Image (cartoon, rainbow, N blue to C red):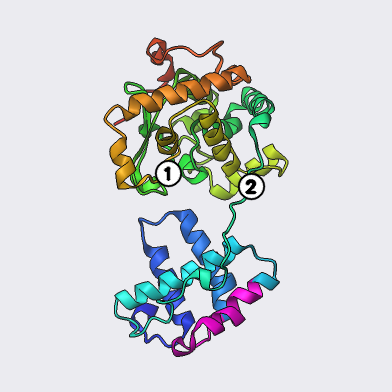
Amino acid sequence: MSRSSAGMRTTGDVVLWWLERVEQNRATSDSYKRSARSMVRKNIVPAVGKVLISKLDRRVLDDKLVWPMVQDGKKAGTQQKAFQALRQAFLMAEKTGRIQVNPMASLTFKSFHPGAIGSKPASLSRVDLPALVQKLATNFDRDPVNGLLPLMMLAHGTRIGETLLAQWSHISLVERVWVLPELNCKSRRQHLLPLTPQALALLARYRQALPDARTQADWVFPVRGGARLAATSASSMFRTVSGGKWSSHDLRKLMRDCLADLGVDYFIGERLINHSLGKVSETYLTRDVMDRCREALERWHARLDECGFSIATGLDMAAPASSQNTETLEPSGALAFS
């Protein structure tokens, strides 16, 4: 019998039912499902799973969940995620009529942590950019198959999960654009990224270096057998490349910082890394947004050229997008967007 059809008496009943819903939701990303599963099974259920719903209150949460996480050295951000998962579980159970009273309704995380929660400091800064680009471009030049992922992420500021879901059918040579479908994006909004001459050249070199069997795969990052590269394998790759000093997310942060240094408009910078801007800000972005995004990426990739990006792309310098000959990028017609 599923938890959705059983009576809910304990906190564990509620959060495990919620987790079941999350895992069955096709619109939910795999990374969020993994995060929710880990948080529920490793932190929430062991701490408060046996607590009766009628007994769950601020004191119990503090004694059994929040304070033990503090004692274990868990960061405030991790504590907040546990609290938010618990709150979402009870809210969904209340809205669907599975519980009569929601003990989490009046509680906020500030009840337990009144101070501001600082973001994790970046492990890469602007001064690291020249050496980083040289390293990544050289790695790609030696081994394009394993060297594309970090360069594509640095060049476009995409999240690792979004990047791994890229398919050749998402890339249009005619429009010179990379389409990230809404179901692939954390924002749940289709994301369009202009492709510069450097990006197109990078993809062409990579495509030519792929083993013949993998060129038939739909995925841009396939493994043997045609499946896409798994997130765990990609994370392991990043640990090897960085020596454990930085993560894939640090590339995204660095790209955003550098866009600001280049004078890229704030709203365009946020759009390029696919941050949600809100309705008012979205109105600010007019119909010329793609042209402005393309100009911003061309400036960013020109900066990468100054640091050695051409080692990977094979281009001596940044060229106007209109001058790029894209015919060489269609070895089997797989790069045509449909």
Q: Measuring from the top left, give residue 278's x and y in whole percent.
A: 34, 47
Q: Measuring from the top left, give residue 126's x and y in whole percent.
A: 63, 31
Q: Is residue 226 visible?
A: no
Whichever of labels 1 and 2 marks the residue nearer the N terminus, that label is: 2
Q: Measuring from the top left, give residue 276's x and y in whole percent.
A: 39, 46
Residue at the spot x=69%, y=66% of the render? Answer: 73
Q: Is residue 13 visible?
A: yes
Residue at the spot x=53%, y=40% of the render? Answer: 223
Q: Is residue 6 left or right of residue 302?
A: left
Q: In the displayed image of the protein, which residue is found farthest to the right?
A: 243
Query: Is residue 66 magenta-colored?
Result: yes
Mark count: 2
Report the magenta residues as a range. Answer: 48-69
In the picture of the structure, the residue carrying the numbered disc 2 is 121
Q: Quadrant of the N terminus?
A: bottom left
Residue at the spot x=31%, y=41% of the render? Answer: 282
As shown in the figure, which amino acid type bears the numbered disc 1? Answer: His
Q: Quadrant of residue 250?
A: top right
Query: Is residue 186 magenta-colored?
Result: no
- SS of the residue under disc 1: loop
In the picture of the structure, the residue carrying the numbered disc 1 is 275
Please say if the residues under marks 1 and 2 sit with CB atoms less than 8 Å apart: no
User: Which sits in the foreground, 331 or 277?
Assistant: 277
As shown in the figure, which amino acid type bears the numbered disc 2? Answer: Pro
